[in-house]
Image (cartoon, grey):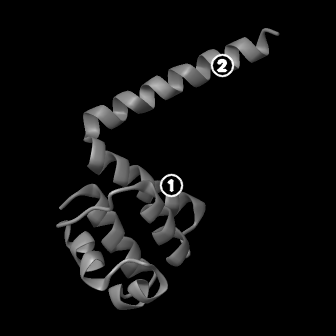
Amino acid sequence: MSKFSVLFSDLLERKCITVYSLAQTTDIDRPYLQKMKKGERIPKDVTKIKELSIAMHLTQTEAAELLEAYHLTTLGEETYLSHKKILSTINSIYDINNNSI
Protein backbone atom coordinates (compact mmCIF):
# COMPACT_ATOMS: atom_id res chain seq x y z
CA MET A 1 0.00 0.00 0.00
CA SER A 2 1.10 3.56 -0.67
CA LYS A 3 2.00 6.07 2.02
CA PHE A 4 -1.12 7.98 1.02
CA SER A 5 -3.49 5.04 1.40
CA VAL A 6 -1.95 4.00 4.73
CA LEU A 7 -2.35 7.51 6.14
CA PHE A 8 -5.80 7.96 4.60
CA SER A 9 -6.99 4.70 6.14
CA ASP A 10 -5.43 5.62 9.50
CA LEU A 11 -7.09 9.05 9.51
CA LEU A 12 -10.48 7.53 8.72
CA GLU A 13 -10.07 5.16 11.64
CA ARG A 14 -8.80 7.84 14.07
CA LYS A 15 -11.64 10.19 13.14
CA CYS A 16 -14.23 7.37 13.24
CA ILE A 17 -15.31 8.17 9.68
CA THR A 18 -16.75 5.52 7.41
CA VAL A 19 -16.17 5.47 3.67
CA TYR A 20 -19.94 5.63 3.25
CA SER A 21 -20.30 8.82 5.33
CA LEU A 22 -17.31 10.42 3.59
CA ALA A 23 -18.85 9.67 0.19
CA GLN A 24 -22.05 11.40 1.33
CA THR A 25 -20.19 14.59 2.29
CA THR A 26 -17.94 14.76 -0.79
CA ASP A 27 -18.32 14.47 -4.55
CA ILE A 28 -16.27 11.28 -4.48
CA ASP A 29 -17.97 7.92 -5.10
CA ARG A 30 -17.90 5.35 -2.30
CA PRO A 31 -16.22 2.64 -4.45
CA TYR A 32 -13.48 5.11 -5.42
CA LEU A 33 -12.92 6.04 -1.77
CA GLN A 34 -12.76 2.36 -0.86
CA LYS A 35 -10.12 1.82 -3.56
CA MET A 36 -8.16 4.82 -2.23
CA LYS A 37 -8.25 3.28 1.23
CA LYS A 38 -6.97 -0.06 -0.12
CA GLY A 39 -4.21 1.60 -2.14
CA GLU A 40 -5.74 0.72 -5.51
CA ARG A 41 -6.44 4.33 -6.52
CA ILE A 42 -5.08 7.79 -5.80
CA PRO A 43 -6.80 11.12 -6.50
CA LYS A 44 -5.76 12.75 -9.78
CA ASP A 45 -5.28 16.22 -8.30
CA VAL A 46 -4.67 18.17 -5.12
CA THR A 47 -8.19 19.63 -5.03
CA LYS A 48 -9.57 16.22 -4.02
CA ILE A 49 -7.07 16.05 -1.17
CA LYS A 50 -8.24 19.46 0.05
CA GLU A 51 -11.87 18.37 -0.30
CA LEU A 52 -11.16 15.24 1.74
CA SER A 53 -9.30 17.24 4.40
CA ILE A 54 -12.25 19.57 4.85
CA ALA A 55 -14.85 16.79 4.86
CA MET A 56 -12.82 14.79 7.39
CA HIS A 57 -12.34 17.87 9.62
CA LEU A 58 -8.58 17.36 9.65
CA THR A 59 -6.34 19.66 11.64
CA GLN A 60 -3.80 21.73 9.72
CA THR A 61 -1.10 19.25 10.67
CA GLU A 62 -3.16 16.24 9.58
CA ALA A 63 -4.08 17.94 6.29
CA ALA A 64 -0.41 18.77 5.65
CA GLU A 65 0.57 15.16 6.39
CA LEU A 66 -2.08 13.85 3.99
CA LEU A 67 -0.95 16.27 1.28
CA GLU A 68 2.69 15.28 1.81
CA ALA A 69 1.77 11.58 1.62
CA TYR A 70 -0.12 12.33 -1.60
CA HIS A 71 2.92 14.04 -3.14
CA LEU A 72 5.25 11.27 -1.97
CA THR A 73 2.97 8.72 -3.60
CA THR A 74 2.36 10.56 -6.86
CA LEU A 75 5.88 11.89 -7.44
CA GLY A 76 7.89 9.16 -5.79
CA GLU A 77 10.00 9.67 -2.70
CA GLU A 78 13.23 10.69 -4.47
CA THR A 79 11.56 13.29 -6.71
CA TYR A 80 9.45 14.66 -3.88
CA LEU A 81 12.44 15.07 -1.57
CA SER A 82 14.41 16.75 -4.39
CA HIS A 83 11.56 19.22 -4.94
CA LYS A 84 11.35 19.89 -1.22
CA LYS A 85 15.09 20.58 -1.02
CA ILE A 86 14.94 22.96 -4.01
CA LEU A 87 12.08 24.88 -2.40
CA SER A 88 14.00 25.09 0.86
CA THR A 89 17.03 26.48 -0.98
CA ILE A 90 14.91 29.06 -2.81
CA ASN A 91 13.29 30.13 0.46
CA SER A 92 16.71 30.46 2.11
CA ILE A 93 17.96 32.68 -0.73
CA TYR A 94 14.79 34.75 -0.49
CA ASP A 95 15.26 35.16 3.29
CA ILE A 96 18.91 36.17 2.87
CA ASN A 97 17.98 38.78 0.27
CA ASN A 98 15.20 40.23 2.41
CA ASN A 99 17.37 40.40 5.52
CA SER A 100 20.22 42.18 3.72
CA ILE A 101 18.04 45.02 2.45
Q: Quadrant of the N terminus?
A: bottom left
Residue 28 at x, y = what percent? 37, 77
Q: How many marks?
A: 2
Task: Compare residues 61 and 26 and report the one nearer the observer.
Answer: 26
Left of 39 or right of it: where is 22? Answer: right
How many residues crowd around disc 1 within 10 Å: few (fewer than 14), some, or many (20 or more)?
some
Q: In the shown orientation, is residue 25 left or right of residue 101?
A: left
Query: Residue 30: which quarter of the image?
Result: bottom left
Q: Which residue appears at 35% of the width and 28% of the height? A: 82
**Residue type (three-letter) at the residue carrying disc 2:** Tyr
Residue tagged 2: 94
Residue 80 placement: quadrant = top left
Q: Which mark is residue 8?
A: none
Please tell me which residue lies in front, 32 or 79: 32
Q: In this view of the protein, can residue 17 be seen by the observer?
A: no
Q: From this viewpoint, which residue is outermost toward the top?
A: 100
For mark 1, give the secondary structure. Answer: helix
Above or below residue 28? Residue 46 is: above
Q: Residue at x 50, y 69 (%)?
A: 51
As drawn, is 40 to the left or to the right of 79?
left
Across and down, in percent, residue 55 comes to 52, 77
Amino acid beneath label 1: Ala
- Residue lying at 32% horizontally and 62% vertically, measured from the top left: 43
Kindly identify the residue that appears in the image at 40 percent across and 30 percent down: 83
What is the x, y in percent for residue 5? Answer: 27, 65
The residue at which mark 1 appears reads as 64
Q: Position of residue 16 (x, y in %)?
A: 42, 86
In whole angstroms, how far apart are the C-alphas of marks 2 and 1?
23 Å
Is residue 76 in view? yes
| Label 2 vs 1, first from the N-terminus | 1
